[in-house]
Image (cartoon, helix red, strand yellow):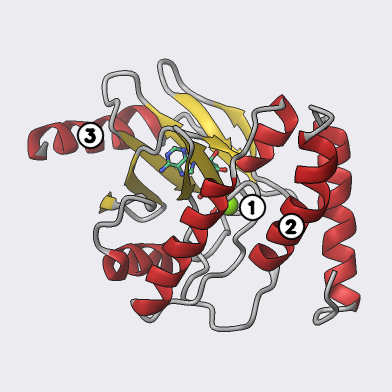
């Protein structure tokens, strides 16, 4: 593991970072990945970073922060406090603008809704328990939405903990759960509907606006 981590870090520094082109166009939309050097693959991107995998390192991913996006030290600190827990990733190493993380093999709930993959209630319960565990470690679950949680073999995972030092209240996960019980279960799931990304992104933008004007309003 130590050796393979060292060679992965060399590959990151020599092959990935010099050729990877990332851009954060707006801070509230995912980072745009313009170029990924072969044989790396982009697994996803969020508002801060892109996450990439190399085929020779099946257990790790590399989260590369886009130029100008803050928070990498805080994310490493959150992983330090979390230690080992089955619902979270782990941080194996870090550089100036990247973290080497344990690869989670799952599908984000956002992608599940798009692809019509059923999400059982167990996933929601697992994520609730994982967030409770994070609180017990002095952390503040923050920004827990559909792109930051995953389902893997019917169990829930939390893929993005980068904002968990932020003590400001955040209703995102409560709102996701409300949407799960009131919209997903009775409508989308029972009619087996798939929701196109354009519509999901529209809901995301509408939600952001709603929370800006009514931060405390229940949905
Ligand atoms: N440890 C991981 N294993 C596998 N995929 C991951 C992992 N971490 C992140 N991803 C993928 O990359 C996407 C962006 O990562 P995320 O941590 O949410 O970035 P950001 O902090 O910019 O929001 C996630 O939605 C997920 O698809
Ligand atoms: Mg994210």
Residue 181 visible here: yes
Residue closest to the eye, 23 or 29: 29
Q: CA distance from mark 1 to mark 2?
A: 6 Å
Q: Position of residue 94 (x, y in %)?
A: 29, 53
Along the polypeptide, which appears first: circle 3 or circle 1? Answer: 3
Observer-side mark, 3 or 1, equals 1
Residue 144 placement, left or right of 214: left
Instruction: Look at mark 1 in the image and give the residue it sits on.
Output: 47
Disc 2, SS: loop
Quadrant of the drawing holding the N terminus: top left
Query: Within 10 angstroms of label 1, few (less than 14), some, or many (20 or more) residues?
Result: some
Query: Within 10 angstroms of label 3, few (less than 14), some, or many (20 or more) residues?
Result: few
Instruction: Look at mark 2 in the image and give the residue it sits on.
Output: 28
Asked if labels 2 and 3 touch by Cβ distance under 8 angstroms, the answer is no
Query: Number of callouts in the render?
Result: 3
Residue visible at 53% across and 78% down in the picture = 166
Asked if labels 2 and 1 touch by Cβ distance under 8 angstroms, the answer is yes
Residue closest to the eye, 148 or 40: 148
Q: Position of residue 184 (x, y in %)?
A: 77, 44
Residue 180 placement, left or right of 154: right
Query: Within 10 angstroms of label 2, few (less than 14), some, or many (20 or more) residues?
Result: few
Q: CA distance from mark 3 to mark 2?
A: 32 Å
Instruction: Look at mark 3 in the image and give the residue it sits on.
Output: 10
Q: Is mark 1 within 8 Å of ligand 1?
A: yes
Residue 4 placement, left or right of 42: left
Quadrant of the drawing holding the C terminus: bottom right
Q: Is mark 3 within 8 Å of ligand 1?
A: no
Residue closest to the eye, 152 or 182: 182
Residue visible at 49% across and 32% down in the picture = 20
Residue closest to the eye, 69 or 208: 208
Residue visible at 91% across and 77% down in the picture = 213
């Amino acid at each position: 593991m130590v050796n393979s981590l060292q060679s992965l870090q060399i590959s990151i520094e020599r092959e990935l970072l010099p050729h990877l082109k990332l851009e954060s166009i707006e801070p509230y939309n995912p980072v745009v990945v313009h170029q990924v050097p072969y044989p790396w693959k982009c697994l996803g991107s969020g508002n801060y970073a892109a996450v990439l995998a190399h085929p020779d390192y099946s257990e790790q991913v590399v989260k590369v922060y886009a130029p100008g996006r803050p928070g990498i030290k805080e994310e490493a600190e959150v992983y330090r406090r979390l230690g080992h827990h089955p619902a979270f990733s782990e941080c194996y190493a870090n550089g100036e603008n990247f973290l080497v993380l344990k690869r989670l093999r799952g599908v984000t709930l956002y992608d599940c809704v798009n692809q019509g993959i059923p999400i059982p209630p167990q996933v929601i319960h697992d994520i609730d328990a994982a967030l409770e565990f994070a609180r017990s470690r002095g952390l503040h679950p923050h920004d827990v939405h559909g792109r930051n949680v995953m389902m893997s073999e019917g169990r829930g995972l939390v893929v993005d903990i980068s904002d968990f030092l932020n003590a400001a209240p955040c209703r995102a996960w409560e709102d996701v759960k409300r949407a799960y019980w009131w919209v997903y279960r009775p409508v989308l799931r029972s009619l087996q509907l798939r929701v196109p990304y354009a519509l999901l992104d529209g809901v995301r933008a509408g939600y952001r606006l709603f929370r800006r004007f009514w931060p405390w309003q229940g949905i």
